[in-house]
Image: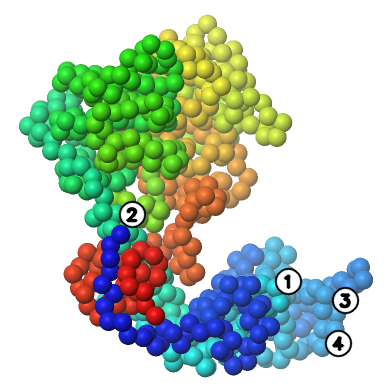
Amino acid sequence: MAVLEIGINKPLNKVNMLNQSITAVKGIGGETAEALAEMNLLTVKDLLEHFPYRYEDYRLKDLAEIKHDERVTVEGKVHSEPSLVYYGRKRSRLTLRVLVDRYLIQAVVFNQPYLKNKVNLNETVTITGKWDQHRQTITVNQLYTGESAQNKDFEPVYAVKGKITVKGIRRFIKLAFSQFGNEIAETLPDHYMTAYRLMNRRDALQIMHFPSGPNDMKQARRRFVYEEFFYFQLKMQALRKIERENSHGIGQHYELARLMKFIDSLPFSLTDAQKRVVNEILADMKSPYRMNRLLQGDVGSGKTAVASIALFAAKTAGYQGALMVPTEILAEQHAQSLTSLLEPFNIRCELLTSSVKGKRRKQLLAALQSGEIDILIGTHALIQEEVEFKKLGLVITDEQHRFGVGQRRILREKGESPDVLFMTATPIPRTLAITVFGEMDVSIIDEMPAGRKAIETYWTKPDTLDRVLGFMEKELSAGQQVYVICPLIEESDKLDVQNAIDVHAVMSHHFHGRYEAGLMHGRLNSEEKEKVMTDFSQNKVQLLVSTTVVEVGVNVPNATMMVIYDAERFGLAQLHQLRGRVGRGDKQSYCILLADPKSEVGKERMKIMTETNDGFVLSEKDLELRGPGDFFGRKQSGLPEFKVADMVHDYRALETARNDAALLIQSEEFWTKEEYLPLRVYLQEQGVLEGEKLD
Ligand code: ADP
Ligand code: MG
């Protein structure tokens, strides 16, 4: 742990004032404080920073501009006597017709029967509520009689809990503000305030709680978005710096001349993007720090080539390398391609999976321990206890997010402190990459090898299967092969989805005597799987009906078409991965999505698939449509929560904040200047830095 010179030990008055208990606010007593504590509001600061989650917009609007289901405030004349209907004991519905500009609409008020006598024919009313465009009806939340009865344009709406009401919290915040408003100090360094013309903290807080015009609100929000991201990134960047400086990694002094020879021997020349990431990786390996790097690259962008270069470099530096992949099929494939690339250079690659057993396994493990094996490729079998390396220098894991964090750590611990490279073909949206992997270095291959043809993707309803079969026939008769992907293996009661076994039966029947159809799914044992895959890659089988087992890394360049059943059930990132199995040769490839999504979002997703082949664009879109929680699986995502900022929509601010924080953390001034003391204190409070305790 880095020891922090915190600087001068003077009391930080302004911070302390706001750090007082919430009962310091005149008008908030013990009982209220208890209820507020239930909401995690303990100090004056907590209360002042309890931001509204939305605003009620009371500005009058033209109904023509209001979308269905939107909240709206309108002013109009009561056009009919209100009619009141009771149902049940306490429930009632009051209906009235209101003339708003040139529209005659209906207003419905639930459970406020007393309003019947308050609104009169021809009287002006201001109503706020949800607009049902189809029924031309507003379900009323608030109704005032008389013109411009509402004198505010916006009203903040807060999350509340237990005894605390929204009105209550508004009042408490007002009390806190009038008593402590002048104690609100600036928390961002001047430099950024000026550079981005940010509103000062006090004014911004005031506007968040007591909103004025929409432009002010936007500026206030912008300030807090930056503040939240900046503080978050400050922490991440500090962690990263400490991790780097305290990781006693190994400097792998590879032989450049031999490495260049190897690179020249590859059957292609590297793309610029590949060259760039190779340089980034080699620099890490050579440095005495431990590499902790994420390599992102779309399917087919040539990550495996990059991996082989890094492994080669490790070998020339006198170290062993390991490549860990999620499935046996993939392990076998990688073992094959790496062996063919590296064996001519006298580098010994071996495959270790759970199907390597008995004597062969013993020999393999012994050879690994004695250092005869240079590169070991395998599945999670690599991290079993019995597996011991002589001198492990580089660990590469492919499709990293499929491994648990624990598994990755174990593998890392097998070496002294080996360099670690995580590779993923799931393009992680930049926004998430810089938050979730904030403490990692990220390399991106954002360029495809030249000459690749974009896959043409079509979306069609399942009832057009006949035409799809015709299309398949065309590809097959041209000597190409086809994947057919289904979401499940067997019929399930719960889900009405096509299953691989049924679809296989259909395909076998349809193409009977002309083309062979193979069946691949997760319940086959590894020999069966291997046989099917071999048959397919040797073109003994022309059609492969499969579940998503083929998703990762499988390489059969002669396959030019993929049909995906129930495509709406897959995430965009996964569909893109699947689609990446075709388009690996020089022929035009196709992907057919059979889907009948019901929701707008579902339709949108299918449409996007047909419009872009760019994995990063898709993943950003996926994130936008589904939200970050869904993207990584709920809860376990470990994504930070921001009060005001939104990672997806404010990602530019996130990038800016990240760059600013990274530069600042690297700078000399940050650690010495008085100006940055509060930020250093913050890092200390967050447990990132150890230092003398402040009193
Ligand atoms: P990824 O692992 O990123 O999906 P691969 O490394 O499997 O991609 O590469 C996909 C295909 O492209 C392979 O057949 C590989 O030989 C080829 N390839 C890789 N890099 C290049 C390049 N720079 N130029 C041409 N072909 C390349
Ligand atoms: Mg190193």
Q: CA distance from mark 3 to mark 2?
A: 62 Å
Quadrant for the N terminus in the image: bottom left
Marks 1 and 4 close (CB-CB < 8 Å): no
Nearest to the observer: residue 604 or residue 105: 604
Q: Label 4 crowding class (10 Å Cα cut-off): few <14, some 14-19, many 20+?
A: few
> Closer to the N terminus: mark 3 or mark 2?
3
Occupied quadrant, residue 324: top left
What amino acid is labelled 2 in the image? Glu
- Whether label 1 lies within 8 Å of ligand 1 gets the answer no
Q: Which residue is mark 2?
A: 439
Can you say which quadrant of the picture contains the C terminus? bottom left
Q: Earlier in the sequence, mark 4 or mark 3?
A: 3
Report how far apart the C-alphas of labels 3 and 1 lie in the structure: 15 Å
Image spot of residue 497 (x, y percent): 64, 31
Classify 575 as above or below 246: above
Please tell me which of labels 3 and 1 falls first in the chain: 3
At numbered mark 4, what does the secondary structure look like: helix, strand or loop?
Answer: helix
Residue 370: x and y, percent?
A: 24, 22
For marks 4 and 3, give the CA distance. 10 Å
Badge 3 marks a residue whose secondary structure is strand
Structural distance between the alpha carbons of marks 4 and 2:
64 Å
- Kind of residue sitting beneath label 3: Leu
Q: Amino acid at mark 1?
A: Thr
Residue contact between numbered discs 4 and 3, judged by CB atoms under 8 Å = no
The reply to whether residue 544 is in sight is yes
Q: Quadrant of residue 394?
A: top left
Residue that mark 4 sits on: 117
The numbered mark at residue 139 is 1
Q: Nearer the viewer, residue 90 or 339?
A: 339
Q: Secondary structure at mark 1?
A: strand
